Amino acid sequence: MGSLKEKLKSLPKKPGVYLFKDKYATILYVGKAKSLFTRVSSYFTPSPDLKTGILLARLHDIDYIVVKSEMEALLLEDELIKKYKPRYNISLRDDKSYPYLKLTVNEKWPRLLLVRRKVGDGALYFGRYQGKMVREVIRLCKKLFPIRWCKESPLQERKQGCLYYRIGTCSGPCIGKIAKKDYWVLVQGIKALLSGKMDQALAKLKQEMVKNSSKREYERAAYLRDRMKILSEMLEGKELSAPPTPRRLSEIIELKKVLKLKKEPMRIEAFDVSNISSKNIVGSMVVFYGGLPAKSEYRKFKVRTLKNKPNDVAAIYEIVRRRYSKSLASQLSLPDLVLVDGGVAQANAGKKALVEANLASIPIIGLAKKQEIICFPNVTKTLALAKTSSALKLLQRIRDEAHRFAITYHRQKRARSLYES
């Protein structure tokens, strides 16, 4: 942003056309100005509105063309828009390309829709919006405030959540996963966002995060915390972070298929043990949600029962049992799949711990190193996936992260013991 500020200072106070470009030199937006300096500088306010914030988050460079008059600037702007078709521009004469956003506060469970005209139906209307900007605004609003995506009205009750709920972008009102008053907090957040009241929108997110944290719904609280970070970065003019919602859906869908699971394994917890030199035996647990690491939920275990006698199978049993039988059982959400580093023996040990915790229904597998074969508890059959399998690559990535985390903890313990001796 520093180089942009320097360029702003050099802009002439003359009529012309300015071109906003991204880091790939692609033209994002073309605009006209009576004074290039005044017009372009007006974008860089401490609290830009939502549309400007999205545009600035992608802005990397500014070019401009000086002309003799404001009319000449108008004609040149039209010519350049038609030539380059910038993402955030539309044809100046195509009124149909200026849609509204409609927040259906006249419904019990409001939705956010793109519409072409206003109707006196009690809903709230925002806009008009230009070009492809409107769909980005919808995606951003629903990423920050996960209201429902379905189109039905009124909303019907269901037994199972849809895909949007499973990947964390819907709060699940149709299956009773959110109270009406809490859902309306999300709606009010969107209203504030679209009205340009960014501080109020941020406050709504914080309100929900604190409420979920107090209920020990830590996964949901972390989800809202990440959305607060996205909104804060946008307001500061930074490039938007990658969305925390899962981006590896195809891997998860394939994993469900090859393992014959009842549902997509969105939350996977993996365990590994490290016991170099038979001392300082430790275990690790890592958590992946939607194919991405949830590092705030990683846990370390100092193995207590082995007394420097290495036994990976017994160690896996201990750390899995402690995860699902002790205080962690109430602090963290349950996984859709458990993965242990090892073969059938390790899978059996993990399964035994799950049974003792009354969680026998949670599927568990082992992934043996070198052969990269998937093992199942209490059966001799194994599963060998192709090296190109996206499901295998997902399991390898999670297993390797558990191994890295265990090794790191072991080294810390070993260094501490050497210092203490």
Image (tube, rainbow, N blue to C red):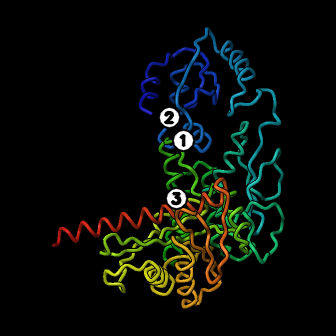
Can you give x and y, in whole percent of width and height, for residue 210 in the image? 49, 70
Check disc 3: other Cα within 10 Å, few if <14, some if 14-19, many if 20+: some
Residue displayed at 73% across by 75% down: 262
> Which residue is most to the top?
68
Q: Which of 267 and 374 is in front in this view?
A: 374
- The mark closer to the camera, 1 or 3, is 3
Residue assigned mark 2: 44
Q: Is mark 2 on a helix, strand or loop?
A: loop
Apparent side of residue 267 relative to residue 6 in the rendered image (left or right): right
Check disc 2: other Cα within 10 Å, few if <14, some if 14-19, many if 20+: some
Q: To which quarter of the image does residue 304 belong?
A: bottom left
Q: How far apart are marks 1 and 3 (CA)?
A: 21 Å
Q: Is residue 206 above or below residue 216?
A: above
Contact between marks 2 and 3 (CB within 8 A): the answer is no
| Kind of residue at disc 3 | Asp
Quarter containing the N terminus: top left
Residue assigned mark 1: 48
Q: Is residue 187 visible?
A: no
Apparent side of residue 338 relative to residue 327 in the rendered image (left or right): right
- The mark closer to the camera, 2 or 3, is 3
Q: Distance between the residues labelled 1 and 2?
A: 7 Å
Apparent side of residue 221 relative to residue 409 in the rendered image (left or right): right
| Kind of residue at disc 1 | Pro
Residue displayed at 63% across by 80% down: 362
| Kind of residue at disc 2 | Phe
Q: Is residue 374 above or below residue 37?
A: below
Q: To which quarter of the image does residue 175 belong?
A: bottom right
Q: Can residue 391 be seen in this view?
A: yes
Residue assigned mark 3: 226
